[in-house]
Image (cartoon, rainbow, N blue to C red):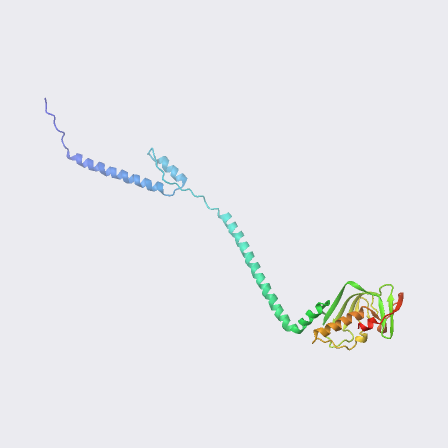
Amino acid sequence: MEETKKPHLDHTFIKRLNEDKKDESKLTLAGDALKNVIIKEVRLKDLSDRLLLSRQEKVTVKEVLLESEIDFVNSLKQLKSVFKEELKTAIEKVNDLYQNELIKLQTLYRSEVIGDKLIEIVKTVADAGWYLLMKDSSVNLCKFYHPAYEVCVGVSEHSDAVKVYEDPVCYLKAIYVNILHTKITYGTINLSTDEQHPNCEKANFGAACAGSLQDRPIPLDDPEQLLQLLNEVSRTYERIHLDSSYFTPSGNATARKDTTWKTAM
């Protein structure tokens, strides 16, 4: 039998073996690179193209991130709406603060210009139905009647007889006393009426005849005394003073004796 020969160890074998090992490392590096590509965030279309071009039968996908595009138009609209609401709220807050400060400033200004004494007068007479009113070049304390007061009684300083008219001679709506005057004189007292008051020079609105109130001082330095004078004025023109009337009412009237109206003056 022929002796079996050992295979000849060719020196190229070692060289080829080393080259195979090098190729294996190249394959390993190529596989890692593919993994790195897949791990990265890619668009779905790019991933699909790469998978189709790949010669491998199996592909391991570790993670695929898909993000939708931001709707910038709607986002801007929402931001604009939020900004408008916030701006509106801020403006309203500033306006409220401004109005509050303006009221405080006006209050201080009026207190300095008008004076604390006039404010005290207004508070005192208001409880009796008198109110402060600026009219033209006058400063008036006014009493308003709601409903209008029916003037039916006529009196005289020279007689205890009182005339009571069957129908109202006029309807008294308001009395105005100009407190810029230091004392009661012509033009100090004005009456607002329906029909003419016999003690008023004009119908509807006009200066009243002062009668026994003529030259009475208007005590602005004493609110209580001023209130007493105002109440006397109102009682005066709720009646007809026949002694100082511009005309004598022509309506039917009955006479009766009554002296209480004098003590009420």
User: How far across and down, in percent of the image, does residue 218 sit?
Assistant: 73, 76
Quadrant in the rendering for residue 250: bottom right
Residue 151: x percent and y percent?
Answer: 82, 66
Decide if residue 125 is on the left or right side of residue 20: right
Instruction: Indicate whether 233 appears above or below 39.
Output: below
Residue 58 placed where, x, y %? 34, 34
Q: Quadrant of the N terminus?
A: top left
Residue in the picture at 56% in, 61% down: 94
- In percent of width and height, residue 181 lies at 73, 75
Check the image and report above or below for 60 versus 263.
Answer: above
Q: Which quarter of the figure has residue 9?
A: top left
| Quarter of the picture holding the C terminus | bottom right
Residue found at the very far top of the displayed protein: 1
Q: Is residue 20 visible?
A: yes
In the rendered image, the vertical position of residue 116 relative to residue 47, given as above or below: below
| Residue sitting nearer the eye, 70 or 136 | 136
| Residue drawn 58% across the image and 66% down it | 101
Answer yes or no: is residue 179 visible.
no
